Every structure is written in structure tokens, then in C-alpha cells.
Image (cartoon, rainbow, N blue to C red):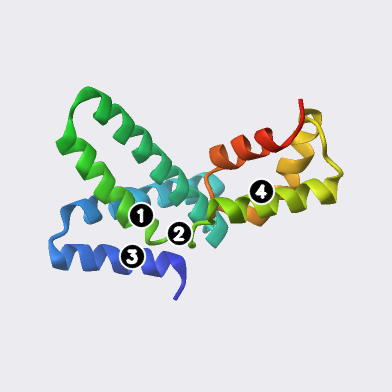
């Protein structure tokens, strides 16, 4: 089933089950998708939808951090449930050893050794990662492997 159809079905399912957190997360995602479609003046492809989902998850993770610092466990828990609902639409995430393996491969392919070569490595690496790992984590791991 196509990703957009799965998302629309999830909304219907959330409405039927009266799952407010899932409903809210999926509605926000569908709204963001419609806004992007208007911006691009065409339907979104699977990769673009996955990027949008990943950005929605990232926004919610940032909110979780803020709510934790503010001592608002009720709002933090709601955001975490919404994250869980959205992550169901993303491909399975890579483990850190898998990310490291891809980094090593990208470094071999580009001949990178120093931090000056980081751009080459990231350009080679990110299409392979394809939304299966957070960009911030990938960036940190690449930076740690390259010599100053």
C-alpha cells in the first residue's frame, strides 16, 4: 500500500479507536503534506513524505526536551505518544553499527581522511541513509571518524 494511503487509513483507524494522540499527529502530518503539495504544485513522492514525517518527529522530540526541562510530564507524554504514531510510517531505523559501516564505506569511496572532506562524505552518505537515521547523529559520527 502506498505511504499516503497508509497515513489516511491510520487517521480513520485513530478516529474509530478514539485515539486522540494518534489522530492529532496524523492530522498534523496530512496538513503538512497538503501544504507541501501546494508549495511544490504537485503530489509528493514517497521520499518527500518520509522527510516530512522525519521533520515532524524531530519537532516533537525538541518539544519533549523542552517539556522535560519545564517539568510538564503530561505534555511530554503526549508528544512521545505522537512520535510513536508517526514513527510507524518511517522505514526501520539503522543501528549505530550499521551507520558506522555506511560511514566507513563512504569514506573509502570518497578517499576522505580529514574534517575538510566531511562535505564529500556526507554527500555520498545521506542518500544511502535515506531517512533511516537522524542527520544530526550521522553528522556527529562522521565528525568523530575524520581526523582534524
Give how far apart the Cα atoms at labels 4 and 1 are: 21 Å
Secondary structure at badge 2 equals loop
Of mark 3 and mark 1, the one earlier in the sequence is 3
Give how far apart the Cα atoms at labels 4 and 3 are: 28 Å
Of mark 3 and mark 2, the one earlier in the sequence is 3
Which residue in the rendered view is the most extreme toward the bottom?
A: 1
Residue at image position (70%, 38%) is 145
Total tally of numbered discs in the picture: 4
Pointers 3 and 2 in contact (C-beta within 8 Å): no
Secondary structure at badge 1 equals helix
- On the rendered structure, is 1 left or right of 44? left
Q: Nearer the viewer, residue 62 or 21?
A: 62
Whether 136 is drawn above or below 94: the answer is above
Secondary structure at badge 4 equals helix
- On the rendered structure, is 102 left or right of 44? right
Percent x, y of residue 146: 74, 34
Give how far apart the Cα atoms at labels 3 and 2 are: 15 Å
Q: Nearer the viewer, residue 28 or 71?
A: 71
Q: Nearer the viewer, residue 5 or 19?
A: 19
Give how far apart the Cα atoms at labels 2 and 4 are: 16 Å
> From the image, which quarter does the N terminus lie in?
bottom left
Of mark 4 and mark 3, the one earlier in the sequence is 3
Residue 45 shows in the view: no
Pointers 1 and 2 in contact (C-beta within 8 Å): yes
- On the rendered structure, is 83 left or right of 58? left
Q: Which residue is mark 4?
A: 126
Q: Residues within 10 Å of mark 2 (few under 14, many from 20)?
A: some
Q: Which residue is mark 2?
A: 90
Of mark 2 and mark 4, the one earlier in the sequence is 2
Residue at image position (45%, 59%) is 90
Dividing the picture into quadrants, the one containing residue 117 is: top right
Amino acid at each position: 500500500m502506498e505511504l499516503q494511503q497508509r497515513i489516511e487509513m491510520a487517521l480513520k483507524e485513530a478516529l474509530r479507536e478514539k485515539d486522540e494522540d494518534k489522530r492529532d499527529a496524523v492530522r498534523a502530518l496530512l496538513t503538512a503534506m497538503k501544504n507541501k503539495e501546494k508549495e511544490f504544485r504537485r503530489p509528493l513522492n514517497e521520499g518527500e513524505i518520509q522527510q516530512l514525517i522525519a521533520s515532524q518527529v524531530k519537532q516533537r522530540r525538541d518539544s519533549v526536551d523542552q517539556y522535560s526541562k519545564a517539568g510538564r510530564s503530561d505534555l511530554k507524554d503526549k508528544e512521545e505518544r505522537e512520535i510513536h504514531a508517526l514513527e510507524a510510517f518511517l522505514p526501520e531505523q539503522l543501528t549505530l553499527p550499521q551507520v558506522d559501516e555506511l560511514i566507513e564505506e563512504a569514506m573509502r569511496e570518497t578517499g576522505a581522511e580529514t574534517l575538510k572532506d566531511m562535505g564529500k562524505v556526507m554527500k555520498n552518505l545521506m542518500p544511502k541513509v535515506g531517512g533511516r537515521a537522524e542527520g544530526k547523529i550521522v553528522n556527529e559520527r562522521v565528525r568523530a571518524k575524520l581526523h582534524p
